[in-house]
Amino acid sequence: MPDHKPKYKRVLLKLSGESLLGDLPYGIDLDSTRSIALEIKEVHALGVEIAIMIGGGNIFRGIRGSESGMDRASADYMGLLATIMNGIALQDALEKEKVLTRQVSAIEVKAVAEPFLRRRVIRHLERGRVVIFSAGIGSPYFTTDTAGVLRALEINADVILKATKVDGVYSADPMIEKDAERFSTIRYIDVLKKGLKVMDSTAIALCKDHDLPIIVFNLFDNGNIKRVVLGEEVGTTVF
Ligand code: UDP
């Protein structure tokens, strides 16, 4: 039986934009956003310091814009702005649950978010505020996965919690191949060599170079974030 003391003191939770989608084809489903906020609240109540990197794929992805003929950098900036909208929705849902938060954006949007100042972010975490990072690293050609790894390193997070819609890392896409096998652990190098879809290769390489473990797990199994934080064997650990 796992004890009820968290295994990690400070975590970086990577939430894709899709986690806010619910059953909508596009945009933000407020009920789904609230459910995630409730899960985060439970983990926060354990005393774990939580920083979140929020994605934007439920609204806009730069690559999609560039495939339709847009300039890639302009399209990526639209993607970045999408993450800020998601950040506001998540912040609202958390604060409705009485969890104190700060939104920290990598591009300046003074009316809704603070600029990224590493020491200030660490102070927020120490004071028990949930920090929501938006706008990735503020530059086009990156993903919020890579941005999450970068911020996790900067704030000395113990682990990256990569919330997805599958149960972990599989040998092939489990939605397509029925006998795809789930790994309970896998090395960074094997993820890269096998081209497994965990995070983009920049993000994996950064974790590998700095020994930052990633736990990939299914966000849609109720209570999973808490299980992971308590050290239960959930999903796949990339190390
Ligand atoms: N993006 C970017 N730089 C960053 C992070 C994100 O340009 O540092 C843009 C990029 O266009 C990306 C979009 O923002 O497609 C949304 O982020 P992402 O696709 O990572 O979101 P997720 O898949 O997690 O929902």
Image: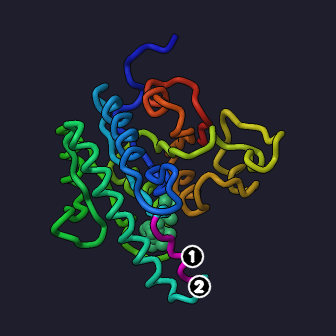
Judged left or right of residue 157, residue 17 is right
Alpha carbon separation for disc pair 1 and 2: 6 Å
Q: Is mark 1 within 8 Å of ligand 1?
A: yes
Residue 205: give x, y in percent of width and height.
58, 58
Residue 122: give x, y in percent of width and height.
24, 47
Q: Residue at x 58, y 26 (%)?
A: 233
Dots 1, 2 in contact, CB < 8 A: yes
Residue 152: give x, y in percent of width and height.
39, 50
Judged from the image, the secondary structure of the residue bearing numbered disc 1 is helix
Q: Does the magenta run of residues contain 85?
A: no
Amino acid of disc 1? Arg
Q: Residue at x 30, y 37 (%)?
A: 49
Q: Which of the two residues, 62 or 200, is positioned nearer the viewer here?
A: 62
Judged left or right of residue 55, residue 182 is right
Colour setting = rainbow
Assess disc 1: are there few (<14), some (14-19) or many (≥20) residues with their C-alpha within 10 Å of its C-alpha.
some
Assess disc 2: are there few (<14), some (14-19) or many (≥20) residues with their C-alpha within 10 Å of its C-alpha.
few
Amino acid of disc 2? Ser
* Residue 212 in view: yes
Q: Which residues are magenta?
A: 59-66
Q: Residue at x 18, y 53 (%)?
A: 120
Residue 68's label in the rendered image is 2
The residue that disc 1 covers is: 64
- Residue that protrudes farthest toward the front in the picture: 24
Q: Which of the two residues, 3 or 213, is positioned nearer the viewer here?
A: 3
Residue 169: give x, y in percent of width and height.
67, 43
Q: Residue at x 19, y 37 (%)?
A: 98
Q: Is mark 2 within 8 Å of ligand 1?
A: no
